[in-house]
Image (cartoon, grey):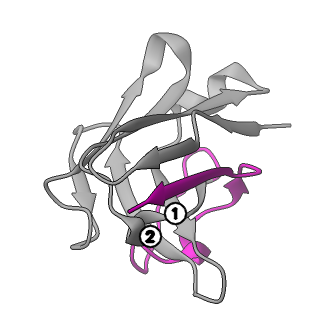
Amino acid sequence: QVQLVESGGGSVQAGGSLRLSCAVSGAAYSYYYMDYMGWFRQAPGKEREGVAVIYTRTGTTDYADSVKGRFTISRDNAKNTLYLQMNNLKPADTAMYYCAAPYPGRTYTGNWYEGRSYNYWGQGTQVTVSS
């Protein structure tokens, strides 16, 4: 059973930085066959939002317009871990952040920022940015 465990959330002032981690555990081979992995966030009273995605084979990344130039997604294959480096944080970034992954070998037909493109979800880590 694949599990995703996020960490690294916390409270910071506007302009600060945080790095979120998402450790993938379970069947070790699964991580290497996940063609893409993503980060999502959800603020109270708002819909879940796709934040960033990374494609394993090419290393290509994509971001929501709201975080471009401030957030960086990466993965460390040796550690089976996904990261989200968040710089110049704003109060609007306050949300619960989740990492997500597809079934190994799955490709999606929709969009990376849609939750239906993913099958595994972490429990979330809270990020709070004060002004």
Identify whether 112 is placed above or below 83: below
In the image, taking residue 90 as reference, residue 30 lies left or right, namely right
Residue in the foreground of this view, choosing between 55 and 50? 50
Residue in the foreground of this view, choosing between 119 and 74? 74
Q: Which residue is mark 2?
A: 50
Whichever of labels 2 and 1 marks the residue nearer the N terminus, that label is 1
Q: CA distance from mark 2 to mark 1?
A: 4 Å
Residue 58 picture quarter: top left
- Check the picture and name the quadrant holding the C terminus: bottom left
In the image, taking residue 61 as reference, residue 125 lies left or right, namely right
Residue in the foreground of this view, choosing between 117 and 109? 117
- Within 10 Å of disc 1 (Cα), the crowding (few <14, some 14-19, many 20+) is many
The residue at 48%/76% (across/down) is 49
In the image, taking residue 11 as reference, residue 92 lies left or right, namely left
Is any atom of residue 99 visible in this view?
no
Numbered range of the magenta stretch: 103-131
Residue 57: where, in percent of width, then height?
Answer: 30, 37
The residue at 64%/23% (across/down) is 29
